Amino acid sequence: MTSASVRVEERNGVPVVIISGEIDIVNAAEVGGQLFNAAPNSASGLVMDLSGVSYLDSRGVHLLFELANRLRTRHQQLHLVVPARAMIRRVLVLTHVDSVMPLHHTADEAVRALKSGS
Amino acid sequence: MGGGVGGAAVPDTRPGNRTRQWRLGTSLLVSLALLLALLMSFTFLTYRSVLAERRDAEIENAAAMARTVAAEVDRFIHDLQTTTLAIGTILGNEGIPLDQPSLGNYLGRIVQDYGFIRALFVTDLNGHVLASASGEGIGLDLSDRPYMEALFTGTPAVWSDSLSGIQSGQVTVAFGRPIPSRGGAVRAYLLTAFYPRSLVARLQSTLPDDSRITLVDRHGFVMHSTYLPEISPEQRDVSSFEPLRNALAGRTVILTGDGLPISKEPRFGAIVPVSTTGWAVVYTRPLEPLEARIRRPVIEQAALLTVAVVLVGLIFGFIARRLTRPLSTLADTAAAIARGERPHIPDVTGAIETSQLAAGMRSMAEAVAQREDRLQGALDGERASREAAERAQTRLQFLTEASSVLAASLDYEETLRNVAQLAVPSFADWCSMDVVDDEGKVERLAVAHVDPKKVDLAYEINRRYPPDPSGGVFRVVRTGEPMVVPHVTEEMLRAAARDDAHARILRELGLVSAIMAPFKSRSGVLGAISFVWAESNRHYTDEDVALALDLARRAAVAIENAHLYRRERGIAETLQRSLLRRTMPEFPGMTIASRYLPARQETEIGGDWYDAMALPDGRIALVMGDVAGRGIEAAAIMGQLQNAVRAYALEGHPPAVIMDRVARLLDIREMATLVYVAFDPAAWTLSYANAGHLPPLVVGPRGHVHLLEGGGPPLGSAGEIVFHEQTAALTPGSTILLYTDGLVEVRGEPLDEGLSRLLRTAAEGRSDDPAALLEHLVGSLLGAGAGPDDVALLALHAAPLDPVHLRLRLNAVPSSMPLLRHTLRRWLVPAQLAPAEVFDITVAASEAFSNAIEHAYPAADAQIEVEGTLDGGDVNIRVRDWGQWRQPRGANRGRGLGLMRGLMTEVRVEPGPTGTTVYLRKRVQREVTA
């Protein structure tokens, strides 16, 4: 069993999804569903805080790409929060996630970036 | 007599009972023997008296003879004296010269004339022989002889004693007298001599042959005896013989059988004295011939008597036999009549009296038989009514017993078999049970007969001739109507028979009467019971039919209850089976074992349950609970509890929180205990919470045991409960044991004792093999099996991983992935790798594993092998499957391989015909602590 908890907060009108735990083939679909519903149509985008994610593999990466694609159809942006020393950062870099969606060190930074529309 | 029935009048024909009674033949024989003895003794007495008489007469006779002989001797002596006197007178003439020439011839002539004189001679006055008849011995001097000396003294005549003959040496007797001259002076002496033998021989010739004469001189010397002619000189002296002395004294003595001392046999006779010379004559005859003469006629007479008596005895015996034989036959017959038999009265031949007796007995036997028949009739009537009452009693008893058997158990197959056994032989010779199975088919459940061989035969007949599905039991089951055949007829058998052989077999079974009653219930006909009378030759009555229907109704209720119970029990068992996981999750380096022992003598399942699961964070949870109550309700609560615990546990909550939430979620009214233990194999720590359950037990690698104490009251207790989490460290190589109270509780014993027994027993067991440990505990503490309560056991043995070499075989399913990650971390973290390196290797191995799942093969039980080696600064991982390698499709699929290559130093994929192997290598910065 893999477990991950998903919590949604709103900072300055931006929905921030805080995920903690592990994301793998077992719970990727479940987590993905929760994430997609977390972003209302009115929002300009979605911040995903992956600071608490201790494990993420290609399945999780696939989930991120899928989510980004789906948000894009609604003209919404996906910003990720990954601390500098987070171990999953190497996975995101290796799979070129950073070329599709911006990575931030903190949630505030991500919210700010999203609001500014960069 | 009064009140005596039948047997009192039976004559006792056995001998020797009471006073001895003799058979007629025996008495006859004894009488005859007595008669014979009497006659014999009479004969003997007669013989004795006759013998005595005859002997007396003979003795008298002999005495007379003896006197005659004595008279003869006397006459001879007298003659001799006269003769010698005459010769003396002649020779007295002095003119006759006294010399041999003158007298020789004269003397010789005289001797010749007398014959018995042996010698005759003349001597001078000095005793010198002058002349002799034989002419011998002239001049012989006889002066020294006693008889000569007597003559010299002037004795007119003298007899010598017995002498020895001069020439012959024979016994001789001499007689002498003086020859006086005319003047009266003695001129010479004349002497004669004779042989007593000759004298006696002459006398003997006139006497009976067996008589013997003995001549004895006055001194008691035997001169001659015809009894013993050659008598020796020693034997001659019989002077000491008393009768002889009497005779020599001048009395005649009678000898009645003693004879003389010289005789060797009994002789009789007499001793008569010869007065002239003082001699005695003994005349004897043998006694034996006399007695023999008398004895012979007596023996002849006795033989005749015996023959006569035996003849009479035979005649009597024959007559007695003619009488006793028919009598004893009749006596036996009379005894048989008295015993109640009806014997044939034999036609006896014999005396008219026995024929009359036989006729009398015949009429007596008939009268007795008639009376017995009348009595028997009355008895039969009474017995019939008693039997009817007994049958009713038997029926009632059978119904009671059968009912209690039916009510006793829910195993209705066994119950019906028992009822069938109960029915024979009191209610049926055959009893069979048929039930309708799940598919609606009629199935024969039981056939009972007193003889098991007959049961086999019944099955054999059924196999050879399958029963007609439209008749018999099938019809009863189909219609639900009973079938009663009070009398089985030949037509019925013929109609039922398939062929001649079948008809013969049916006939041999000897079916007489039958009842078939259906098991009717609300849900339809469940089967039927059949009762058949055969060899008992009885018939079913209306009462029997009522009983059969009653019993069938009860059986139907029992079957229906059993069905209902089984359905419920089936559900409960299924539930419990699903709760008691047979297959435990597998963790590298860990072994889990479990046991569940249902309670003895309990039909319903108990409330013990357990669970084991891998938690998302890599920990392992062990759960055990015990719900009060049994059966389907307990199973339902167990199910709820297990699901709730599982759900909260998988969410990753700590033990106390899980307990708390479970207690809140479930409104449990029943008492339920619950213990939850989470083991972190990476940190070697335990965290647990306990709601009223017995404390888990830890067996250390060296056999040290301790309990995981602490906890709260059970779920379902009144009031708000706050659960606290307990923690403990676990030594690698330890075993954690969870158990229910059935393992340690013994009725009437404090729980502490059970627990300390468990601790002792666990310390003796193996700590490295949980299955063996459970086996040991069950064997030592429970022996044969569970006691009155169920027992559940769950044990986990946790061993540290090999630091250099890791080898895992995991199911090829996505759910294996967390275990893979946790195991890799357990292995790599203690090897002093940097967290980032651990992460990279974990992700890369997971990608390889994920690929293997996705493309390898779809088989449900497929497995993937993951092997890791720590080789100095290199970590090598090999992921191997036995499927078909497929090229990754699409961007996302290729991302996995990219990640592996990005994270690892070297990635090599080796597809092969039997599977694919992915090699991963990463150079790491290990802080090798040598």
Image: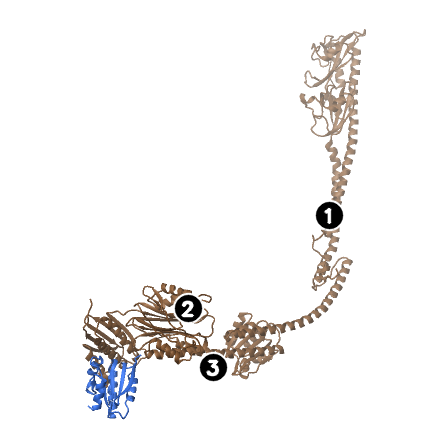
Please provide percent x and percent y for residue B852: 26, 79
Q: Which chain is blue?
A: A
Please provide percent x and percent y for residue B711: 38, 72
Label 2 with label 3: CB-CB less than 8 Å? no
Label 1 with label 2: CB-CB less than 8 Å? no
C-alpha distance separating marks 1 and 2 = 96 Å
Q: Residue at x 47, y 72 (%)?
A: B602
Figure quadrant of residue B905 = bottom left
Residue that mark 3 sits on: B439
Viewer-nearest residue: B436 or B114: B436
Within-10-Å neighbours for mark 1: few <14, some 14–19, many 20+: few
Decide: is B601 above or below A92. Answer: above
Residue that mark 1 sits on: B30
Viewer-nearest residue: B215 or B511: B511
Q: Amino acid at mark 3?
A: Glu
Q: Split into 4 quadrants, where in the image is the C terminus of chain B?
A: bottom left
Q: Earlier in the sequence, mark 2 or mark 3?
A: 3
Q: Residue at x 75, y 33 (%)?
A: B290
Viewer-nearest residue: B623 or B197: B623
Decide: is B837 above or below B144. Answer: below
Can residue B928 be seen by looking at this rendering? yes
For residue B743, the mark is 2
Q: Colour of chain B?
A: brown
Can residue B864 be seen by looking at this rendering? no
Q: Amino acid at mark 2?
A: Leu
C-alpha distance separating marks 2 and 3 = 42 Å
